[in-house]
Image: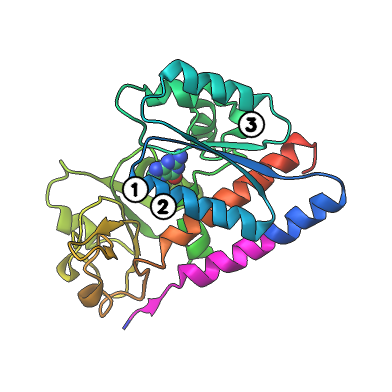
Amino acid sequence: MARIIDGKEISRVVREQVAAEVTALKERGIETGLAVIIVGDDPASKLYVSNKKKACESCGIKSFEYALPESTSQEELIALVRQLNGDKRVNGILVQLPLPSHIDEQEVILAISPEKDVDSFHPVNVGRIMLGDYSFLPCTPAGVMELLARSGIEVEGKNCVVIGRSNIVGKPMAMLLLHKNGTVTICHSRTRNLADVTRRADILVVAVGRAGFVTADMVKEGAVVIDVGMNRKPDGKFCGDVDFDNVKDKASFITPVPGGVGPMTIAMLMKNTLTAAKLQNGIK
Ligand code: GUN
């Protein structure tokens, strides 16, 4: 039976550390602020945004919420982003994705000042990740790395397999594992003999968005299994991409859903916002 990696608890510790630093900044007269923009009424996005707001409160970070109607034009949204780029109270800007289909996401991301891009989606920050020289890490992959580190799991020299090649998770995840000297393979929907590849993984990170996608026969005995999936079941509850009940008997470590990677994503957003505030005030 695998050890369950408790993302809820680890994220609490991270948030506590962020809160202590936010308080220390406050004592030097520096307030930390995060602007969160949501466009439209997508219930999942609304839930994420409300969780981000709560996390800000728990860390002493001031949150500025902009809930815009679905009908907002790209120009209006970009005008708001530009206004926030110039707003000294705002250290981080997050535009919740996905955006309505009439808005070009990439254009909006490009409008965010890279210094305030706490999601690390701007091409400048994406490039810095490639180079291994970065201030902000994309929140979900950074959360996974934090879970591994705080669980005492070494990456160096290990076979790391990432399933999923999204810009938000799969690609940066592979880079961060590579920076820690893992031997990294990225799998995707066109990968042949997927199970043969995943069975070689010492560390398997799954981000495909399909409930129960990874079954026990795809996992090596003693592997570390990290489940980034968040799928809603017909009963309204959430489950991951991994068949947890069967895989847990084979893995050495496994993350549950919920309570694994999810809370870490938000904790890392808080950490990035703190980093932004420090950088913008010339503090290392
Ligand atoms: N939508 C789903 N995940 C994310 C995220 O990490 N950041 C933003 N901005 N939108 C998202």
Give neighbour class at mark 3: few <14, some 14-19, many 20+ (Cα, 10 Å). Answer: many
Residue pictured at 36% horizontal, 22% vertical: 103
Q: Is residue 188 visible from the viewing direction of this image?
A: yes
Q: Amino acid at mark 1?
A: Pro
Give neighbour class at mark 2: few <14, some 14-19, many 20+ (Cα, 10 Å). Answer: few
Q: Amino acid at mark 3?
A: Glu
- Does the closest atom of ligand 1 sit within 8 Å of the Cβ of label 2? no
Please report whichever mark, 2 or 3, sits nearer to the chain's N-terminal start: 2
Give the residue number, with chain letter if any, for mark 3: 115
Q: Secondary structure at mark 2?
A: helix
Question: Ligand 1, what quadrant?
Answer: top left
Residue pictured at 23% horizontal, 76% vertical: 245
244 is within the stretch colored magenta = no
Give the quarter of the image for residue 257.
bottom left
- Camera-nearest label, 2 or 3: 2
Give the residue number, with chain letter if any, for mark 1: 43
